Image (spheres, rainbow, N blue to C red):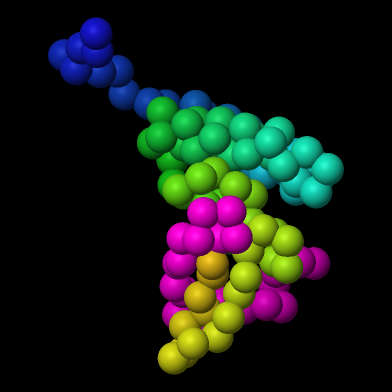
Amino acid sequence: MMRSSKRRSLKKWEQDMALQRISILFKLAHLCHSNRPDRSRRYMKLALAIAMRYRVRLPAELKKRVCKTCNTYLMPSNTVRIRLRNGYLVYTCLECGREKRYPYKRISWRSDNK
Ligand SMILES: [Zn+2]
């Protein structure tokens, strides 16, 4: 059973390490999502588990790349459909159909993918 009485505090380096692992998992998921979707889903599950365990927030650009419902790595035109609707970018996960909306103006495409 979990005991909350002895909750140790997380060190900064532990959280840095966690973030590093998470970004590696995202890279791995990116590499294998087309031939091995099952594997990329496992990487995503792990990344989210690490984030939760070390209480780190996923960077915004990584957050947009994973479906929180089914852990699918979201790849435009492959596992996610992106539409512009009422000033929002609507991401629809093609695996489970979950929609997520992001305000359009806050997303810059230029800094992405480069
Ligand atoms: Zn999904």
Side of 93 relative to 101 (left or right): right
Judge whether residue 86 is colored magenta: no
* Residue found 56% across the figure and 77% down from its top: 107
Residue 82, picture quadrant: bottom right
Residue 29, given in percent of the width and then of the height, sits at 71, 42
**Where's the C terminus, which quadrant?**
bottom right
Residue 25 visible from this viewpoint = no
Occupied quadrant, residue 27: top right
Residue 87: image location, x then y, percent: 46, 89
Q: Which residues are magenta?
A: 93-114
Q: Position of residue 9 (x, y in %)?
A: 31, 24
Q: Is 59 placed above or below 12 here?
A: below
Q: Quadrant of the N terminus?
A: top left
Asked whether residue 9 is in view, the answer is yes
The answer to which quarter of the image holds residue 80 is: bottom right
Q: Is residue 55 shown above or below 4?
A: below
Q: In the visual, does 88 lie left or right of 24?
A: left
Q: Which residue is depicted at the point 45% across and 48% down?
A: 69
